[in-house]
Amino acid sequence: MKVNNIQLLILTLVFISVLLLYKNSKLEFLELYAYDLLIQHHPAKIETSSVTVITLTENDFRKQKRWEISDELLANILIQLLDYQPRAIGIDAYRDFPVPPGNKRLEKLFQSYQNIIVTTKFGNKKEKGFASPPVLKDTDQTGLSDMPVDSDNIIRRGILYLDDNKSIFYSLSFRLAMNYLQQEKEPIRFDGDEQGNLHFGKSTLKPFKPTSGGYEDNEIRGFQFLLDFCKPSESIHRYDLATFQAGNIPAEDFHNKIVLIGTVAQSHKDHALTSCNRQTEKDQPVSGVLLHAAATDQLLRFAQQGKSQLNTATDFQEILWILLWTLLGGFISQHSLSLLQQSIIWVGGLGILFFITDLLFANNFWLICVSPAIAWLLASILTTAQKAAQEKKDRSLLMNLFSKHVAPEIAEEIWQNHELFFAGGRPLPQKTTATVIFTDLQHFTTIAEELEPEILFNWLNDYLEGMTPLVAKYKGVVVRFIGDAIFGAFGIPIPRQSEAEIRQDAINAVNCSLAMQEKLIELNKKWKQQGLKPVGMRIGLYTGSLATGNIGDKDRMEYTIHGDTVNIAARLETFDKAQFKPDFFTQPCRIIIGEKTLQYLDNQFQVKAMGKIELRGKKETISVYEIIKKN
């Protein structure tokens, strides 16, 4: 890869800028958005679950005529549930003070069954905490409901435990999972190592760091892990309270299972946004009890199935990843390509980057993609722009040498294909097949005599400024202006190598002529409003062999084309011109072509035969046609 000093500076600045933006959390929201898309595309595959949820709805609270779960109702649910012999019961309702009636009865149940876990809240700067029920203080029957909330109010992480530098407080999901696992035949391993990793059953969990994945300078409290779902799996059975109390439930959904009890009522506002909730109209926020159920299920899969947690790259690996895409962006700028080709490569590069990220994520590895994508685009676009600026400067030097010899359009072609043109410091003569165009305004001399010079030249420039871009638009070249007449060709200066190219040149010439007619209609209407006369225009087109080259001396050299094709096109334009009666506002142009041009048009245009005619100065006759419109 050949990179000049300026491009090397650009790549360095791009790399440093993107890295600083990423490391200062300015791109974190985009990386997290990309994570959401990935987790939606690759959610955890759960066939069965050992977790069941009993939900309380708005109707349940209306029946008891209060908006809290009374101790009596909770005790009744527990008594009925205990008959199914679940391994662990989680209550996602704060009980830091009694909610009579029935508080003594509920306290007795808490004391009698040590597999009942009641939620508490550690709290933070924004939210106050909630204590455990007094009867359960200093026991293992409480679990935290806390879950880290990201800056965009989305929950993407779960917690194993928090600490206040004095004591460790385990999460509700962890307490429930441990209660379940301790009743397995084989003892569950739960210990840490010197690296800070946690051995949990068949899995080894690495602590989540402030810079893991797309996070930067994230506040990490306790031991966290990335949730592997964006919404709870349907394999987690759910029953509303009315269905449960009626007993219309399969016993196997409760026996030897973890059962969570909690509200899904919207009025309780115990709901959270997850990675699936960016479009809340499609996916409603998840209730807290279902979120805890899904986190509990994930911990069971860690311990029982050896499910690996989602791995992330190290800081150094992320830096190398951004650097790699910066250098790749600089590499593609070294190839001279069209804007369309460059755009395709830019999009293709992004596609490859996102494909790699998606493939890695499917294999349990989260690698950032937004920051390297920005580095890729900035590096490739800026270095391409610098290369284009340098080429423009070099081309300007070429124009200083040839601007007095050739038109700008031809000079551009020469620049792109200069190896075909130069020999001894001057362009070589070429032979090619092209379609020549001649245009002329009808009665221009008469109109010119009636106008003041300033008005005349403004009017003429208005006309030429409208027509000239159309020639370039349809890939033609204006060879010369002859007063009001335009002399040009489609198929120069690069010699055509195939019939397909010649055919396309002919079609372009006719399309250009029809576009000129539409433009002239527009100009005629404008001129009429300005008090100027509308005009008609004759156009002659002919396709054939011709020669291109430079004529003149070293001080005054001009690029031009010569040959019988040029003469015939000029004569077709003037053919029977006295009979042409233009309709200035519907069909102000007469477009005449020869038979050789017609042969290349592939019946794309409606034509009218004008017979065989003998052109002045030629012995043989040629068939002439008028272009009416495009088919």
Image (cartoon, helix red, strand yellow):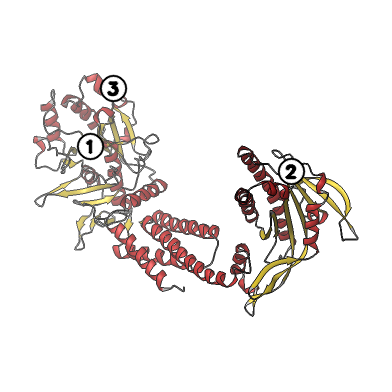
Report whether 63 appears left or right of 468: left
**Residue at image x 66%, y 59%?**
478
**Residue at image x 28%, y 24%?**
58
Question: How busy is the neighbourhood of tag 1: few (under 14 within 10 Å), some, or many (20 plus)?
Answer: many
Depth check, mark 1 against mark 3: the one in front is 3
Q: Name the residue under label 1.
A: 89
Q: Can the viewer see residue 252 in this picture?
A: no
Q: Mark 2 points at which residue?
A: 629
Residue 408: x, y in percent?
Answer: 60, 63
List the single residue furthest toward the right: 619
- Circles 2 and 3 in contact, beta carbons < 8 Å: no
- Helix, strand or loop under label 1: strand
Q: Which mark is residue 59?
A: 3
Report whether 402 appears left or right of 329: right
- Three-letter code, disc 2: Lys
- Helix, strand or loop under label 3: helix
**Residue at image x 22%, y 49%?**
160
- Circles 1 and 3 in contact, beta carbons < 8 Å: no
- Helix, strand or loop under label 2: strand
Residue 267: x, y in percent?
Answer: 26, 27
- Circles 2 and 1 in contact, beta carbons < 8 Å: no
In three-dimensional space, the C-alpha distance between marks 2 and 3, rounded to whole angstroms, equals 73 Å
Question: How busy is the neighbourhood of tag 3: few (under 14 within 10 Å), some, or many (20 plus)?
Answer: few
Between 336 and 395, the residue placed more toward the observer is 395
- Three-letter code, disc 1: Ile
- Three-letter code, disc 3: Asn
